[in-house]
Image: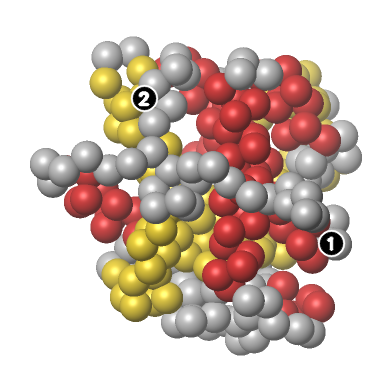
C-alpha cells in the first residue's frame, strides 16, 4: 500500500458538505451553541457562502463551486491562552505545506496567516477561539483558498488562484482531504509540545522574512526588515530607528 502522508485520523472524519451557507464559521459556531456535542476535527465545507467573512471585518469573496471555503473545529484545551499564536502558526503551516506539496509552488505565509504566492493572496484563515478559563475550549478555524476561480471582482485586494498560476483545475474534495491531513499532522506536533519546531518552520515559510521592504504604520511609510515574530504574534521589524513590534492593526505591507 502506498503511504499517504496526507491521511487523517480525526480532522475531516466528520465532514459536512453544504450547498450554501452564510459563512461556514457561523454555521459551525451555531452548531456548537446547540446542545448536541460536535466532534473534534469536524469540517464544514460550503460550495457557496453568501456572507463569507475575512479578517478585520472584511468580506471573503469566492465564486460558488470554484474554491475551498471550509471551517474546522479543533478543541485545543491543552494550549494555554498565552500560546494561542502557536495555533495560528500550526494552521498556517498545515495549509501552506499541503498547498506546496500539491501544487509544487513555493507558497508562503504572509504574517500572520495569509497564504501567498509571490505578491498575491491565494487564501486566508480566520480563527475564532472560544475561551473558557485560561484555555481555548473550541477553535473555529475558517479557511478560504482560491483554487479554480479565474476572474475576481475589482474590490478584492491582490487575489490569485491556483488555476491562474498553473492553468489547470483541481478536484476540490480531494484537495480538502489533503489539507485536513496536513493540518492534523501539524496539530499533533502542537499537541506534543513541539513549539520550537513549529515556530522555526513558520519563519522558514514567512513572506518577506529578512528582506529590506516598505511598510506603513500610522500613515507613515518606512523601510524595515522582518526579523521575527513574538510568541504573542507581534511582528518584529528592524528599522532605522531600531527594533519595533507591531500588531495586525498597526502595520501595512507596501508592495511597490
Ligand atoms: C482573510 O484572509 O481575511 C481570512 C479569510 C477566511 C475565509 C474563510 S472561507 C471559510 C470560512 N468562513 C468564513 O466566513 N470565512 C472563512
**Regarding mark 1 in the picture, which secondary structure is present there?**
loop
Kindly give the residue lying farthest to the front in the view shown. Answer: 1
Q: Report the residue at 39% width, 53% height from top.
A: 14
- Where is residue 4? Give x, y as percent: 73, 52
Mark 1 or 2, nearer chain start: 1
* Left or right of 197 on screen, residue 71: left
In the picture provided, is 147 more to the left or to the right than 165? left
Residue 107 to residue 136: above or below? below
- Compute the Cα span from label 1 to label 2: 34 Å
The quadrant where residue 47 appears:
bottom left
* Quadrant that contains the C terminus: bottom right
Name the quarter where the N terminus is drawn. Answer: bottom right
Image color mode: secondary structure
Picture coordinates of residue 222 (x, y %)?
74, 40
| 13 sits to left or right of 112 | left
**Where residue 150 appears, x then y in whole percent?**
64, 86
Q: Residue at x 56, y 55 (%)?
A: 124
Q: Nearer the viewer, residue 74 or 26?
A: 74
What's the mark number on residue 136?
Answer: 2
Q: Tag 2's secondary structure?
A: strand
Tell me the crowding category of disc 1: few under 14, some 14 to 19, or many 20 or more residues within 10 angstroms, Cα based: some
Based on the displayed image, in which of its 4 quarters is residue 133 positioned?
Answer: top left
Label 2 environment density (alpha carbons within 10 Å; few <14, some 14–19, many ≥20):
some
Residue 113 showing in the rendered view: no
Residue 242 versus residue 218 in the image, above or below: above
The answer to whether mark 1 and mark 2 are in CB contact below 8 A is: no
Q: Which mark is residue 105?
A: 1
Residue under the image location 16 percent in, 43 percent down: 36
The answer to whether residue 23 shows anywhere in this view is yes
Amino acid at each position: 500500500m502506498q503511504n499517504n502522508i496526507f491521511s487523517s485520523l480525526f480532522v475531516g472524519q466528520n465532514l459536512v458538505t453544504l450547498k450554501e451557507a452564510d459563512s461556514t464559521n457561523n454555521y459551525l459556531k451555531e452548531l456548537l451553541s446547540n446542545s448536541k456535542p460536535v466532534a473534534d476535527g469536524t469540517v464544514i465545507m460550503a460550495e457557496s457562502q453568501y456572507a463569507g467573512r475575512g479578517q478585520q471585518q472584511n468580506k471573503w469573496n469566492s465564486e460558488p463551486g470554484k474554491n475551498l471555503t471550509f471551517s474546522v473545529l479543533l478543541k485545543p484545551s491543552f494550549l494555554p491562552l498565552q500560546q494561542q499564536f502557536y495555533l495560528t502558526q500550526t494552521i498556517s503551516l498545515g495549509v501552506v505545506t499541503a498547498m506546496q506539496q500539491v501544487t509544487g509552488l513555493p507558497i508562503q505565509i504572509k504574517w500572520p496567516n495569509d497564504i501567498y504566492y509571490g505578491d498575491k493572496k491565494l487564501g486566508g484563515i480566520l480563527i475564532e477561539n472560544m475561551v473558557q478559563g485560561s484555555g481555548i475550549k473550541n477553535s473555529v478555524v475558517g479557511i478560504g483558498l482560491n483554487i479554480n476561480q479565474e476572474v475576481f471582482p475589482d474590490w478584492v485586494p491582490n487575489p490569485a488562484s491556483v488555476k491562474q498560476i498553473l492553468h489547470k483545475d483541481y478536484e476540490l474534495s480531494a484537495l480538502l482531504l489533503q489539507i485536513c491531513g496536513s493540518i492534523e499532522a501539524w496539530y499533533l506536533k502542537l499537541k506534543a509540545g513541539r513549539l520550537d519546531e513549529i515556530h522555526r518552520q513558520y519563519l522558514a515559510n514567512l513572506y518577506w522574512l529578512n528582506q529590506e521592504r516598505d511598510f506603513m504604520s500610522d500613515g507613515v511609510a518606512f523601510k524595515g526588515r522582518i526579523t521575527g515574530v513574538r510568541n504573542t504574534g507581534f511582528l518584529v521589524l528592524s528599522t532605522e530607528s531600531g527594533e519595533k513590534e507591531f500588531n495586525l492593526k498597526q502595520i501595512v505591507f507596501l508592495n511597490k
